[in-house]
Image (cartoon, coloured by chain):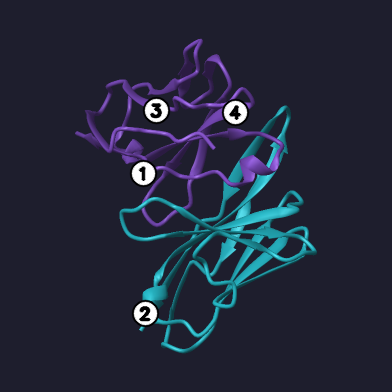
Amino acid sequence: GAVVSQHPSRVICKSGTSVKIECRSLDFQATTMFWYRQFPKQSLMLMATSNEGSKATYEQGVEKDKFLINHASLTLSTLTVTSAHPEDSSFYICSARDRVGTNEKLFFGSGTQLSVL
Amino acid sequence: LAKTTQPISMDSYEGQEVNITCSHNNIATNDYITWYQQFPSQGPRFIIQGYKTKVTNEVASLFIPADRKSSTLSLPRVSLSDTAVYYCLVGPLFSGGYNKLIFGAGTRLAVHP
């Protein structure tokens, strides 16, 4: 199946710094990618939809100035957590959709564990 | 988007068959049903997808009754490595709606020796 690569897998940073997370579709082109956030023992929460060549669409309650999304190419989307604070500590997951035959599937990255000190 | 309801948790033993049922009473005509598996600190992994009746692949079967208001994921002969959270998602394919798949709480399956 299609592969979505996410990097880094884990990052620890000081409060106030910015962190960039990369999401790449390795063997297919993804005009649309998605960013999720997951707290321990909770489900995935969709943060935003990243569209290649255009602005991202954010879900209600997600600060677009806090979570900057860039989708400059058909294989790369980045999420930058700006001025990170301890409450931003979470597991961030990206995904991309790919058409497989007559089906459409979402493929997910391996996730990034962000810890803000 | 159709809301889904699953059991919060299930327990099983190695070698048993596990059936996880998902309710989606307001499923739309063009909605598909997709199941994902997630291990701790990993992204979800696609298991199986279907529209109606029965779908089978190398890891699972998906049973969907005629009214499509529910679906059952069947895992044959589970092993310890099947301990994970299983999510049932419902949404249309090839449209913007599918892009906004909403994850429910999922079912935490614990497989015991």
Q: Which mark is residue B22?
A: 3
Which residue occupies 59% across, 72% down? A64
* Residue that carries the numbered disc 2 in the rendered image: A86
* Residue that carries the numbered disc 1 in the rendered image: B105
Q: Name the subunit of mark 1.
A: B
- B44 with respect to A68 (left or right): left
Q: CA distance from mark 3 to mark 4?
A: 14 Å
B91 is higher (above) or lower (below) than A91: above
* Residue that carries the numbered disc 4 in the rendered image: B31
Question: Which chain does the purple colour mark?
Answer: B
Question: Which chain does the cyan colour mark?
Answer: A
Instruction: Decide which of B112, B27 is in the foreground and name it.
Output: B27
Q: Could you say where residue A28 lies in the image, as x and y percent from the top left?
A: 74, 49
Q: Could you say where residue B95 lies in the image, as x and y percent from the top left?
A: 70, 39
Of mark 3 and mark 4, the one earlier in the sequence is: 3
Q: Are marks 1 and 2 on the same chain?
A: no
Furthest residue in direction left, as rendered: B113
Quadrant showing the N terminus of chain A: top right
Q: CA distance from mark 4 to mark 2?
A: 39 Å
Which residue type carries mark 3? Cys
Closer to the observer: label 4 or label 2?
Answer: 4
Which residue type carries mark 4? Asp
Q: Name the subunit of mark 2.
A: A
Instruction: Decide which of A107, A70 is in the foreground and name it.
Output: A70
Of mark 1 and mark 4, the one earlier in the sequence is: 4
> Dot 3: what SS?
strand
Q: Which mark is residue B59?
A: none
Callout 3 crowding tier (Cα within 10 Å): few <14, some 14–19, many ≥20: many
A73 is higher (above) or lower (below) than B97: below
Q: CA distance from mark 3 to mark 1?
A: 11 Å
Which residue type carries mark 1? Ala
Q: CA distance from mark 3 to mark 2?
A: 35 Å
